[in-house]
Image: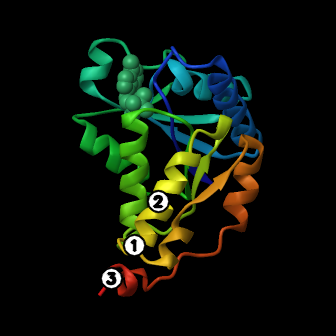
């Protein structure tokens, strides 16, 4: 499986966020998954790649040229695809992935996550989207997304587009048990 992981670049957060990212990298690698991520060397991004590389994992980093110019890339990631801009990176991260995993992160992580959810609603992406709720990080977001449904901005069925898990150990079981997203998702994308 090719797993796309979105996570924080921050080095300033609770170190447990980095520890969990590292653990996820190791877990995915030991299950033979290819990890596709933003290619960064800092924060949870760096820890994710460290964990996977330590377990001899296959890691693909997709990074915009301007980030390599300031040496933000992970020095140990050999499969580094340098792209022209953030849009191309986002497209390359998601396309062909068998699942998306979002660890806690900042605006970059959230933007990437919401693009995946939005494309799924529109029937342009079909794979599982897993949010790792470390330290309850995504509880507020889950509540807000439920609010969007309660307010009629999305359908009840759209709540099945993503799954919250408490720990990184639950990521692969959650991916495997996610029911297929309907091929006719576009037919209920718009609320009338
Ligand atoms: P965030 O969740 O806001 O930390 O953003 C994560 C996204 O921003 C990823 O796509 C990163 O590639 C990008 N990013 C921001 N700052 C850095 C950095 N110093 N090194 C690498 N990537 C970064």
Nearer the N terminus, badge 1 or badge 3? 1
The answer to whether the residues at label 1 and label 3 have Cβ atoms under 8 Å apart is: yes
Q: Which mark is residue 154?
A: 1
> Can you give x and y, in whole percent of width and height, for residue 4 in the image?
52, 46
Q: Taking the image as drawn, is residue 72 in sight?
A: yes
> Can you give x and y, in whole percent of width and height, for residue 29 in the image?
70, 38
> Can you give x and y, in whole percent of width and height, for residue 27 in the image?
75, 39
In the displayed structure, would residue 8 be above or below residue 144?
above
The answer to whether the residues at label 2 and label 3 have Cβ atoms under 8 Å apart is: no
Label 2 sits on residue: 145
Residue at 71% across / 63% down in the picture?
176
Quarter of the figure with residue 52:
top right
Quarter of the figure with residue 169:
top right
> Which quarter of the frame holds ligand 1?
top left
Q: CA distance from mark 1 to mark 2?
A: 9 Å
Q: CA distance from mark 2 to mark 3?
A: 16 Å
Q: Is mark 1 within 8 Å of ligand 1?
A: no
Q: Nearer the viewer, residue 146 or 56?
A: 146
Callout 2 secondary element? helix
Q: Taking the image as drawn, is residue 95 in sight?
A: no
Image position of 170 (left or right of 124) = right
């Amino acid at each position: 499986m090719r797993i796309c992981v979105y996570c924080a670049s921050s080095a300033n957060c609770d170190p447990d966020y980095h520890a969990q990212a590292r653990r996820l990298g190791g877990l995915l690698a030991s299950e033979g998954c290819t990890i596709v991520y933003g290619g960064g060397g800092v924060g949870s991004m760096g820890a994710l790649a460290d964990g996977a590389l330590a377990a001899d994992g296959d890691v693909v980093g997709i990074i915009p040229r301007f980030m390599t110019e300031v040496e933000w890339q992970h020095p140990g990631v050999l499969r580094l695809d340098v792209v022209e801009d953030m849009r191309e990176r986002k497209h390359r991260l998601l396309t062909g992935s068998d699942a998306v995993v979002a660890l806690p992160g900042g605006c970059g992580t959230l933007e990437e996550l919401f693009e995946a959810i939005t494309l799924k609603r529109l029937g342009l992406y079909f794979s599982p989207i897993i949010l790792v709720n470390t330290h309850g990080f995504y509880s507020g977001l889950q509540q807000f997304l439920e609010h969007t449904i309660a307010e009629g901005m999305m359908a009840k069925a759209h709540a099945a587009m993503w799954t919250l898990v408490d720990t990184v150990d639950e990521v692969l079981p959650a991916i495997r048990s996610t029911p297929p997203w309907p091929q006719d998702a576009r037919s209920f994308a718009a609320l009338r």
